[in-house]
Image (tube, rainbow, N blue to C red):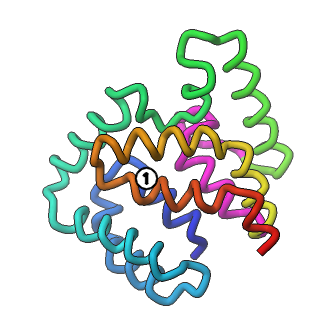
Amino acid sequence: MSIYKILSALLDYPDQALIDHLPEIRDEIGKSQDIDTAEKESMRKLLDHLANTPLIDLQEDYVKTFDLTPEHSLHLTHHLFGDDNDRNRGPALIDLGELYKDYGITVASNELPDFLPLVLEFAAMLEDNEATTFLSDANKVLTVLTDNLTKAGTPYAPLLSIVKSRATLTRLAA
């Protein structure tokens, strides 16, 4: 399982299916050779948090963190254009949706195409270098989002740090 697929699942709204699959996700993280030790540790800490917190509390925290706090929004274009600037945000969303279509992907979700878990699902379908290049377009937004979540002390911040660190073209030179 791709690290991007795992991150997508962990950054999406928590539900019972996620809780039920935590042992499987933990196993996938443990046996993955594409996830480094620090990334594994960060992901395991969140898994522990998810496993040891009542689902209703996880859901409440998720909504407070991501839906009710605009500077924590997982909709990436929000950080570039805000919600009110449809003149620029709309075309960006359309372009991203068209990119998905170019790859034969139909977005079945009710989410906008810039929703980070959806972006990560798409990245999981790409070759590693292609995923890095794709995500690098959002590096500045990911940096701002990571910083905002870190300042808020949310347990999701380390996951954003992983995405941000993988969304840089310098990874391709290594």
Q: Residue 91 occupies which quadrant of the picture?
A: top right
User: Where residue 27 sits: x, y (%)?
Assistant: 41, 85
Magenta highlight range: 106-127
User: Where residue 88 sits: x, y (%)?
Assistant: 72, 16
**Residue drawn at the location 59% of the way across and 32% of the way down:** 112
Q: Residue 137 occupies which quadrant of the picture?
A: top right
Q: Is residue 82 magenta?
A: no
Viewer-closest of 108 and 41: 41
Q: Is residue 31 above or below residue 121?
A: below
Residue position for label 1: 11
User: Where residue 119 sits: x, y (%)?
Assistant: 62, 48
Q: Is residue 113 magenta?
A: yes
Which residue extends farthest right?
102
Tell whether 14 sits left or right of 57: right
Viewer-closest of 118 and 42: 42
* Mark 1: amino acid: Leu
**Residue drawn at the location 22% of the way across and 50% of the way down:** 58
Viewer-closest of 58 and 103: 58
Query: How many marks do you count on the picture?
Result: 1
Considering the image in quadrants, where does the N terminus appear? bottom right
Q: Is residue 172 above or below residue 102?
A: below
